[in-house]
Image (spheres, rainbow, N blue to C red):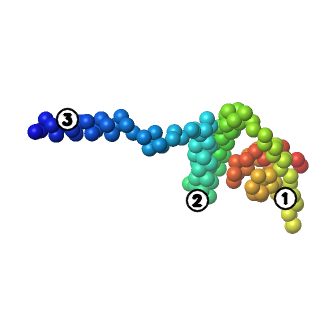
Amino acid sequence: MTLAVSIILISAVLAFVLFIRPGAIPPNETLSPTAHLEERREAIHENLRDLNFEYRLGKLSDDDYEKTKLGLHNELAKVMAGIESIAGKKARPAPAAAQPEMKAGPAKPVYRCPACGAGFDKPMKFCGECAAPMGEAQS
C-alpha cells in the first residue's frame, strides 16, 4: 500500500516538474550593461549627500570635507565615463557652460547648473546637487 502511494506521489511530482507550461515561467529580466555602474553612481550621490550633512553638523573639518568630496567627485567622474563609454555616448546634447549671473547687492557671481538650476558662488566641474557636468564656466 505504501509502495503504491509512493509511486503515485513520485509520478505526480515528476509530471508537475516535467510538464510545466512555458507561459507559467516568468520571462528573464534583461539587465542593462550599465546597471552596476548606475548603482554605484547612486551610492556616490548618497555618500555626497551624507558628507554635506555631516559637514553642516560640524562633524568634519574643512580639510577632511574637501579631501573626501574631491575623492567622491573623482570616483563619480570615472563611473560617469564608464557609463558613457558602455552606452556608446547616445545622442545627448552637450551641457551648456555654467554662466555667472550677478545678484542684486554684492558683486558676487552665481553659477547656475544647466541641468537642475542649482546656484553656486564659485565655478565647479560638477553640480553639487545633481552631479551633472557644469561645463567650462566663463568669467
Residue 99 versus residue 40 in the image, above or below = below
Task: Give the number of marks.
Answer: 3
What label sits on residue 7 in the rendered view? 3
Place residue 53 in its image quadrant: bottom right
Q: Is residue 19 left or right of residue 8?
A: right
**Tag 2's secondary structure?**
helix
Place residue 85 in its image quadrant: top right
Which numbered disc, 2 or 1, marks the residue that appears first in the sequence? 2
Residue 118 versus residue 29 in the image, above or below = below
Residue receiving disc 2: 57
Q: Nearer the viewer, residue 114 or 74?
A: 114
Q: Residue at x 67, y 37 (%)?
A: 83
Q: Residue 138, image x and y in percent? A: 88, 47
Which numbered disc, 3 or 2, marks the residue that appears first in the sequence? 3
- Regarding residue 71, the answer to whether it shows in the image is no
Q: Residue 136, image x and y in percent? A: 83, 43
Residue receiving disc 1: 108
Label 1: few (<14), some (14–19) or many (≥20) C-alpha neighbours in 10 Å? few
What label sits on residue 98 in the rendered view? none
Outermost left residue: 1
Q: Residue 86, image x and y in percent? A: 67, 33
Residue type at mark 2? Answer: Leu
Residue type at mark 3? Answer: Ile
User: CB of mark 3 within 8 Å of CB of mark 1?
Assistant: no
Separation of disc 3 and disc 1 at Cα? 86 Å
